[in-house]
Image (spheres, rainbow, N blue to C red):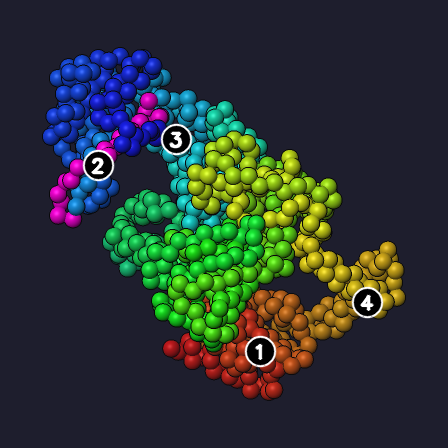
Amino acid sequence: MLGNFSFGDYFKEPACVFSWELLTQHYRLAPERLWVTVFREDDEAFRIWEERIGVPRARIHRLGEKDNFWQMGDTGPCGPCSEIHYDRGPEFGPLEFVDGNRRFVEIWNLVFMQFSRDAAGTLQPLPAPSIDTGMGMERLAAVLQGVSSNYRTDLFAPVIERAAELAAADREDPSLQIDLNVVADHVRALTFLIADGIMPANDGRGYVLRRLLRRAVKHGRSLGLQDAFLHKLSGRVVEVMKPFYPELEPARDFIARVIAMEEERFQRTLANGLKIFDDLLAAALETKQEKLSGIDLFRLSDTYGFPLDFARDLAMEKGVGIDFDAFQRALKEQKERSRFSLLEKRRETAALPGIERWPSEFVGYDDLQAEAVLLAAYVDGRPAETIAAGQQGILVFDRTPFYAESGGQVGDSGSGHGSEAYFTVRDTKKAPAGAILHEVQVLEGVLKAGAAVRLEVDASRRQQIAIHHTATHMLHAALREVLGLHVKQAGSRVAPDKLRFDFTHFGAVSAEELERIESAVNEKIRENLPVARRTQPYEEAIRSGAMAIFEEKYGDTVRVISLGDFSSELCGGTHLQASGEVGLFKIAGESSISSGIRRIEALAGEAAYHYVARGQALLHQVLAHFGQKPEGLLDFLKGLEARAREGEKQSKKGAPGSAAAPLDVGELILGSRRIAGVPVVIASLPGADREALSGLADEIKNRSRGVAVLFTSGDGRSLVVASVFKDLTAKFNANIIIKKVAPMINGKGGGRSDFAQAGGDAVADPEELKERIGRALQEGHET
């Protein structure tokens, strides 16, 4: 959507003139093909179009509030609209300006915000009327390119043509248009979302991405595309859009790999979901249900991503409907739970009554001490006239050198004192409205609003935080240098003793890559790059190459932190004066936290030194213990491991079920008991390990076509396995058997319907346990 605004500057007549001039003189649309609508009571707009611009009266139509009156809600700013429509010609319909006629397409909307509606519904004139202009870019492109829809423009056509090619489908087949259009639209959205650092997830923006992908896959299947295909289309989106969004090109391969991995994941979950859906459908057919449970379908959708329209189509093939209303209620309840959870996360700071009244000025970039005036105190979450020695609470000052937790950086701590009180600041946070909240413990005296105090940040702790924050920026730059420009920050935590950095990447970072990343950061530390700070307009900062974090919200003016040509980021945190102050950087670990998101944990400065020193001390202890030199330690440990494994193999020889002392499975089966006509073997096998016990149980159940419950005990522990022949799981469920047996050994366990296991205390009397298991199976069957 294209737009421009006027706040108290030009109003109705100039806005109409500007729009007409742009469309007819610059885009060269024929004036006789433009039709106009106005609000039914807006005589002024009608007069402007007819008399000032010259639109014939017959091409100006008055419409009601539904079409031509805009408002934000029941109350607040509002006003009449005026729309410009384009006549696409007789091939699209008759020359009748009526609702639903495809011949006319709206391309421009002018909102004249001139009123404010109060609670009684009365319209009051605004002191400064405003203009809100909206124009559909793709609709305009379709008109200018002379095509029948947005999906025929050069923005979509190359993607749709590629999709049709992959499906071996006719691009012009009317029955395929919706599927092709949805695939093209959704893969374009996926491409931009991933390029902006959004990754598939089960909540938030990542969940939107995941649902878009799954819906696109569903429409792809309607085209006959059963295998993963969307990742083959994202490159075409990049080709189309990169002239205007050059940041897409460096992320091309990353985008394709993320989409491919998510497609593969969905194919697996879809297969699992289909099995469950088949069970639901079979049960409905057996009980002659007219509709499938909406709650069951919602769980299937929420857990397995099984699309509702998939379920609907498959159910309709069998003459069964779906309870759509129940599905929608379950979906609404989930959204409410998510909303409540979000509100709960904000409760601590947002729930302080009147907190929005207190502005706070942060003065701590350059000074770690400041004179301030106490504006408000809160004790137990409520406003307090005073806060005295022994009490904990939250204090708000007019100005403060304490940095409030934000942007991944933890809050400052320190102390403060006035003429009558002394207190420690344990943490600093920020309220949604902007007040800086000091979590304090009053040690001496009494504080009340209006008191003058001196605030002092813990300088040593602040320095360690700054070390880790500057190191975080350097790590980000090194990741992009080594892994590629697709890397984007997906979260961070900057503390005085360590840092955590989450980033977008499609696979594990190799040991060699980690070494190069760590080396790159330490190289820049040795170069002692100056850490520059500047404040400038947001757009100017982005044009200069500064990186913004997608999740953060920025104002019109931003703070940029840069280290030479190596790193440049928008950041409001605290930093060093030069990279050399970091001293040392050490990566402590790398891991996956979700699909396409990796995490690096690292240490810098003094924390990194102590980490390396502890590692060196441990290494020397190991070398001394084994009498080895550093260069020979790895080979020594590998040999030790090999000998241990060989010894383990030897110790297993002669164990029940081994090749050296085979058990007579036939004898065990002959000794089975019959429960409900099914052969059941219950046996104790002393000394058997988990692998031997499981293998033997499976062999017994397959040869006897029955049930095997085997257990072993040793070293103060016991293990029980239950294995049930596949055709008997409706009668004997291994998971249920184990749930009954586990309490007998003071243990826990579970598994599938055909195989389950449990661990617990040692078995004192194997014969008694066998009898108890037998009774449990017999009773379970009788019930």
Which of label 2 and label 3 is nearer to you?
2
The correct choice, above or below, for 605 with respect to 29 in the image is below
Is residue 647 rendered magenta in the image?
no
Which residue is located at x 23 percent, y 33 percent? 129
- Near-viewer residue (66 or 436): 436
Label 1, on which residue?
760
Quadrant assignment, res 342: bottom left
Which residue is located at x 36 percent, y 69 percent? 385
Q: What stretch is highlighted in magenta?
A: 119-140
Separation of residues labelled 1 and 2 (CA atoms): 78 Å
- Near-viewer residue (366 or 500): 366
Q: In which quarter of the image is the N terminus?
A: top left
- Near-viewer residue (266 or 478): 478
Q: Residues within 10 Å of mark 2 (few under 14, many from 20)?
A: few
Disc with the residue nearer the chain's start (4 vs 3): 3
Disc with the residue nearer the chain's start (3 vs 1): 3
Label 2, on which residue?
127
Separation of residues labelled 4 and 3 (CA atoms): 65 Å
Separation of residues labelled 4 and 1 (CA atoms): 37 Å
- Observer able to see residue 372: yes
Which of label 4 and label 3 is nearer to you?
4
Quadrant assignment, res 285: bottom left
Label 4, on which residue?
621
Q: Residues within 10 Å of mark 1 (few under 14, many from 20)?
A: some
